[in-house]
Amino acid sequence: QVQLVESGGGLVQAGGSLRLSCAASGRTFSSDIVGWFRQAPGKEREFVSQIFWRGGSTSYTDSVKGRFTISRDNAKNTVYLQMNSLKPEDTAVYYCAARNELYYRYDLWGQGTQVTVSS
């Protein structure tokens, strides 16, 4: 069964840090782009960050630049999102997703992990 499993969410005070993990089973990220998205209550899902498995190129939405870092571990077939200097507005369910680098649409999604930042 092909699936993505996120972990690492939780409750943290503003200014704190969390590291999210996205592990794949049944699929190797060899030619994928792996992204992180988030959805806050009452809001649409938004893009947070992505990484090209081949080459490691990364991109971020403006609101997290300088605070979040996406990375990958080839051996573990896992993508991480290190989140520092967290703000209450970062509170959301965070999802990882994968797509082949040739395609536009993300076709594999995880179940999500809750991140709550208290003020």
Image (cartoon, rainbow, N blue to C red):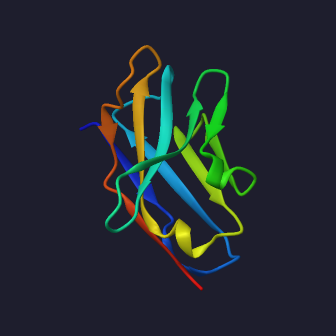
Tell me: residue 10, above or below residue 57. below
Residue 113 in percent (x, y) is at 40, 63
Residue sitting at 36 percent across and 58 percent down? 112
Residue sitting at 41 percent across and 34 percent down? 98
Residue 118 in percent (x, y) is at 55, 84
Image quadrant in which you'd find residue 59? top right
**80, 43: nearer the viewer:** 43
Placement of the C terminus among the 4 image quadrants: bottom right
Residue sitting at 71 percent across and 69 percent down? 85
Residue sitting at 39 percent across and 17 percent down? 103
**69, 92: nearer the viewer:** 92
**26, 59: nearer the viewer:** 59
Tell me: residue 64, above or below residue 73. below
Tell me: residue 17, above or below residue 82. below
- Furthest toward the top, the residue is 102
On the picture, is 8 further left or further right than 85?
A: left
Image quadrant in which you'd find residue 56? top right
Residue 71 in percent (x, y) is at 65, 42
Placement of the N terminus among the 4 image quadrants: top left
On the picture, is 117 further left or further right than 1?
A: right
